[in-house]
Amino acid sequence: MPDYSSQVITRESPPSVAATEIPFSFRLPLTLRSILRRWRKVVGATIGLSFALSVVVAFLELSAGGTYLFTGEYTETGMDVYVLMRGGVIAPLLPGDRIGEIEDARLFLSQVRSFPEVRGVVGTYMTALSRERERLPNGRQDTEPWTAVGVYGDPSRVPGTLVLKQGRWFRSGNEIVIGQSLASASGLSVGETVILNGRRFLITGIGHIRGVGFGSNGYAYLDFDTARELSRGRDIVNLVMIDSLDPPTTVQRIASARDVQIMTKDQAIASVLELANSRLVVYVLFSALALGVAGLFIASVLGSSVNERRTEFATMLAIGLPKRTILGMVLGEGLVISAIASLLGTAIGIGLGELMNVYFAPIRANRANCCL
Amino acid sequence: MLEVRSVTREYRLGEVTVKALDDLSLRIEDGEFVAILGPSGSGKSTLLNLIGLLDVPSSGEVLLDGRDVVHLSDGERARIRLMSIGFVFQRFHLVSAFSAIENVALPLEAAGWPAEARWERAASLLRSVGMADRMLFAPARLSGGQRQRVAICRALANTPRIVLADEPTGQLHSEDKAGIIALFQQLNRAGNTFVVVTHDHEMASAARRIVELRDGKIIREVRT
C-alpha cells in the first residue's frame, strides 16, 4: 500500500513546491486551451466548413464571370443599336430561342448605311457549312459541320467589335477568319487553307466578332455574299449592328422604315442579362444549398462535440465551473472554427472561382489584349 | 458543519411517485469521515447530491455552517460547490483533453487563481499523492488508481470544507483501492472532511462513522 504520510495534504498548509517550467498552454484561457487540445477535431471541422464555404464563394465568383460572359460581348463593343426580327432573341441560348431573319437584307443594310449619323454597319448572316477534311481510304470525303457567319461591313472600323488573337481580318471572298476555340479544336492556324462546301479559303486571322452570340469563338467568319452563295441562301440577314452618333434618331429612322425589333446597347445588355439570370438562379440555388450544408455541418460538429463532452460538461458544472465558462468553451470553439474556415474558404473560393472563370469565361481574362 | 434537516426527495416516474429520501436528518461535523452504506435504491446518491448542492429536496433544509443553501440561485450554489465542496466520482470524470495537472488546476482557474499560483498548488497536490512524475500525462495514460488520485487532488484544490465521494473505489483493482482508502484516511487525519457513498465494506470500515440507509431513511449509525 503506498504511504503518503510524509507528504499528506492539510487544509491549512498545503505543501509548497517550486514551480517548474510552466508549459505555455497552461497559461492560455480555458477556451483556447480546450481548442488547442482538441485540434484534430477542430482542424477536421474547419476543413469541412472551409470546403463548403469555398464552394459558395466559387459559385459567386463564377456567377460574376458568367454574367460578364453574357454581357461583356455587348458592353465592350462600340455598337449602339441592334436590329433583328420582331420576336427574335438577340443571343439564342435556350431551346426554342431564334434570332430570326430580316428579309431584303441588301436593301435594308444600304438604307441604314445611308443614314447620316451612322458611322458603321455590320450585318451577320449565320449558316452551316461543311468542311472537307482528308479523303478516306474508301474514296469518301470526311467532313465536319461548321457554323459560319457571313459578315457585311467592316467590323474593324467599330472600336471593340473585332477581337483578333492572330493575323488580320479577311479582305476578299477567298479569305476567312476562324474563332479561337474552332482553331484549337480543328488544329488550324493562320496561313493554312480550309475547304468549305467545296471552296478553298485562306485563313487570315484567328478571332471573333462581338455580339453575334455566345458561341462566337467557335464560328468561322467570311464575306457576307460568299456565305450566302455557298449556302444558296436568300437575301436575308440575322442581325444588324450599328455604330451611330445619334442612336435615338437611328432607332426612329429604322422603326419608320421596317417592322423589326430595335434595341439600344442598354436594351441589348438588359436582354442578355435576363438570359444570364436564368443561370444566376442556378448559382444562387447552389450557393444557398452549399451555405445550408455549411450551416448544418457546423451545427452538427458543435452538436456532436457537446454530445461527446456531455459528461465532461456535467463534471465541470458539478465541481462549480460557471455555466458561462462552459458555454464560452462551446461557442469559442464554434467561433474559431467559423473564423478560420471563413478566411480559408473565401480565399480558396476566390482562387477556384477565378480559375474557373479563366476556363469558362475567357473573354473576361481577354479584356486587356482583345480589341482593335 | 453540514446538516440536512427532515429532507424528503420525491421523483415522479410517470404516474408513480418514488420517495428517494424520506424525512431524513443528518449532521456532519468538520473533520469527520462518514461512510454512507446501503443497498441500491436506498437513497445514498440522492443524499450525496443534496449535500453537494447538485439537487434540491422536495421538502426540508440543507444547511452549510447554519446557512440554508436550498433557496440560493444556481450561480450562488455553483460558487459554493467550487469553493466549499470537492467531488470524487466513481468513474473519475477527468477532462480527457487536459493533462493531470490541468485537471487539478481546473477549479483553481474557475476561482480566478493566476497561472503560476495554480501551477504551484496543483503540482503540490499531485506530488503529495505520489503523482509528481505523471503531472503532464493525459488521463488516458494513467491507471485507474492514478486517475482517482488526480480526481482527489482536483476535489481538494480549493481546500473545500467537505469532500463528497461517490463509490470512489468502485472502478479500482484491489491494490489501487487500498491505496485510495489509505489516502482518504491520511487526508482525513490531516483535517479534511469526507462523506463517502460506498458499497465497499473495506472503504466503509476506514470511516470513523458509518450511516446505513434503507428506503430513504437512516436505519443505523455506527461510530468506529
Image: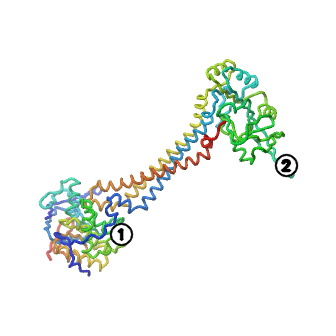
The quadrant in which residue A224 appears is top right
**Same chain, labels 1 and 2:** no
State the quadrant of the C terminus of chain A.
top right
Q: Is residue A176 above or below residue A7?
A: above
In this rendering, the count of numbered labels is 2
The residue shown at (40%, 57%) is A304
Where in the figure is residue A126, as x and y percent of width and height? 73, 34
Q: Is residue B208 above or below residue A116?
A: below
Q: Chain of mark 1?
A: B
Q: Secondary structure at mark 2?
A: strand
Q: Is residue B213 left or right of residue A57?
A: left
Where in the figure is residue B57, as x and y percent of width and height? 20, 58
The quadrant in which residue B24 appears is bottom left
Q: Is residue A39 above or below residue A227?
A: below
Q: Is residue A112 left or right of residue A288?
A: right
Depth check: A316 or A270 in front? A270
Q: Chain of mark 2?
A: A
Tag 1: amino acid: Ala
Where in the figure is residue A115, as x and y percent of width and height? 69, 20
Q: Is residue B13 above or below residue A93?
A: below
Q: Secondary structure at mark 1?
A: loop
Residue lying farthest to the top in this orientation: A256
State the quadrant of the N terminus of chain A.
bottom left
Tag 2: amino acid: Arg
What label sits on residue B138 in the rendered view?
Answer: 1
**What is the C-alpha distance between the residues marked 1 and 2?**
78 Å
* Residues marked 1 and 2 touching at CB (< 8 Å): no
Work out whether residue B92 can be spotted.
no
Task: State the residue position of label 2.
Answer: A135
Work out whether residue B194 can be spotted.
yes
